[in-house]
Image (cartoon, helix red, strand yellow):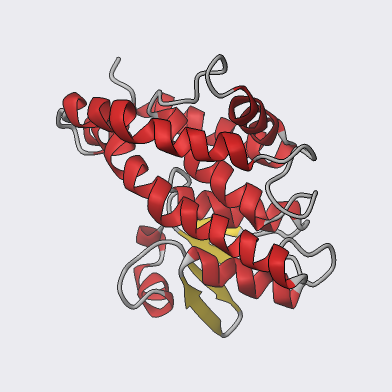
Amino acid sequence: MIVYGSSVSPFVRKVRAFAAEKGLELRLAPPQEDPEGFREASPFGKIPAFRDGDFLISDSSAIVAYLDAKFPEDPLIPADPRDRARAIWFDEYADTIVQEAVAKVFYHRVAAPLFYGKPGKPEVADQVEREVFPRLAAYLERSVTDSGFLVAGQLTLADIAVASAFASLAEGDCRPDPARYPRAAAWLAAMWARPVFAALLAEEEALLASMAPR
C-alpha cells in the first residue's frame, strides 16, 4: 500500500500514524516520484493520495476509513454510535478548525523560509497564536477525558487526528502552555511519545533540520 504525500503534512502524518497504530505498513511516496500514479489517485492534486492495488482514493479521512474497514482487527474508529460520531467530529475539528491555524503558523514560521526560500509574515502567525490558538487549546483542555483519551476510553482516530494537527503547530513553536492548559499539554506529550508518533516526528525533525540555513 502506498500513500502519496509529504511527511510534514498533518494529513499524511495522520494516515501514517493511523496505519502504524494498526500494525499496517504503508510506503510513503512523494508525488514527484510517480506523478502519473499520484494524479491517478488524486485527480485534484491534493495530498494524501492512496493506492492499494487497483483501489485508489484521496483525502486522509477517506483513507483511514478504508483502512479501518479493510483491517477490522483492533478498530480505531469506534462502532458505538455516539463514540463513532465523536471520533468523526474530532477528525473534522483537526482537519478544518485546527488546520486553519496550522496553515498560517506552519507556513509563515516554517514552510515559507525552508520550502520556498522566502520570508514568511511572522505577524500573521503571531496573531493566530495570540487570538486563535487559545480557543483551540481550551477546547482540547476540556475534551481530554480522565482515561487519557478523547473518545471511548481508548486510542481512536480522534486522538490520532488531533495530535497530528497539533504537532504541525508545535513545529511552528505554538504549543499549549502547561501552566494554563495542563491536561491538553500532558495529553499531547503522551501522544507524541507513543512509538508511532515519536518515529514520525523524529523523521520530520531530521528533514526540517536538513533544510535549515547553515
Q: Residue at x 57, y 18 (%)?
A: 178
Residue farthest toward the front in the current orientation of the protein: 142
Q: Position of residue 82 (x, y in %)?
A: 70, 67
- Say if 44 sits above or below 30 in the image: below
Q: Position of residue 110 (x, y in %)?
A: 31, 31
Residue farthest toward the right in the current orientation of the protein: 73
- Say if 179 sits above or below 194 in the image: above
- Say if 190 sits above or below 74 in the image: above
Q: Position of residue 28 (x, y in %)?
A: 54, 56
On the question of residue 199 being in view, the answer is yes
- Say if 89 sits above or below 198 in the image: below
Closer to us: 40 or 157? 157
Q: Residue at x 49, y 29 (%)?
A: 205
On the question of residue 167 being in view, the answer is no
Q: Residue at x 27, y 39 (%)?
A: 104
Closer to us: 144 or 59? 144
Residue farthest toward the bottom in the current orientation of the protein: 54
Q: Horizontally, is 38 left or right of 24 in the view?
A: left
Q: Position of residue 63 (x, y in %)?
A: 56, 69
